[in-house]
Amino acid sequence: MIWMDFIMLSLKSVKWVVLLGVLLCLSCSARGEQKNIGFLEKSVRGNEQGLFLDAVVALRLSSEAEKALKSGVPLVWVMTVRVWRQREILWNKKIAEVICRYQISYHALMDVYRVTNEQNGTEKKFTSLQAALNEMGVLNNIFIMADRLVVNKKQYIIGVLFALDKERLPLPLRPVAYYDSEWMLTSQWNLWSFQK
């Protein structure tokens, strides 16, 4: 009888492990690489005030995201820029991080798309979705860090990531956005090095 209880308890725990494994596999398969966001151009320039990023990002919405946008759900995009100083012995040291947010919304009564830069509050209106996405993808004069933080003759790595902010979606839509591949709207980290 004791052996039977042990076997039954073991089988129950095995079922949970198998179920957890299946959920993990489903989660990983939904996070496949997306071709909806890509960097066309990027450059860093410095002057006496600091380092600035200019980039052009190609954005394309999935059919589900476009349907949600046209139903009145605003989509917030986050661009994250990080700068690391390369080191010989230890891992690279992060010395700067900048996060910029851009919102795109659709207004059915006026039939316009509105792009808002959440850093400075500027707003532009467009009659087509592609024109609005193109505007949101042109990033000019993004301040990264002060020039005094950049040491001469040292190697630096800059990384840029552009992604949909799923936490800013309406609450009922968030679980779907985390596991549906139609909502995996993120670029890969785009890395390059520079030296002052």
Image (cartoon, rainbow, N blue to C red):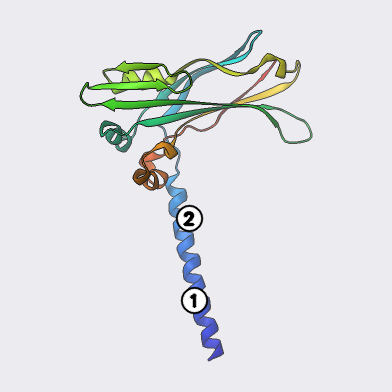
Residue receiving disc 1: 11
Please determine whether, in this image, residue 33 is positioned above or below residue 54.
below
Q: Earlier in the sequence, mark 2 or mark 1?
A: 1
Q: Nearer the viewer, residue 142 or 43?
A: 142
Q: Residue at x 71, y 32 (%)?
A: 92
In this figure, which residue is indicated by the disc labeled 2?
Answer: 24
Pick out the residue farthest to the right: 89
- From the viewer's perspective, tell me whether residue 42 is left or right of residue 112: right
Query: Which amino acid, by three-letter code, is at mark 2?
Result: Leu
**Label 1 residue SS:** helix
Residue 36 % position (x, y): 40, 31
Query: Is the residue 136 above or below the residue 28 in the image?
Result: above
Q: Residues within 10 Å of mark 2 (few under 14, many from 20)?
A: few
Would residue 100 appear left or right of 181 to someone viewing this image? right
Q: Is residue 50 left or right of residue 128?
A: right
- How far apart are the alpha carbons under marks 2 and 1? 20 Å
Residue 91, x across and y down, in percent:
72, 36
Identify the image quadrant of residue 107.
Answer: top left
Neighbourhood count class around disc 1 (C-alpha, 10 Å): few under 14, some 14–19, many 20 upward: few
Check if mark 2's residue and mark 1's residue have beta carbons within 8 Å: no
**Residue located farthest toward the top when viewing the structure as drawn:** 48
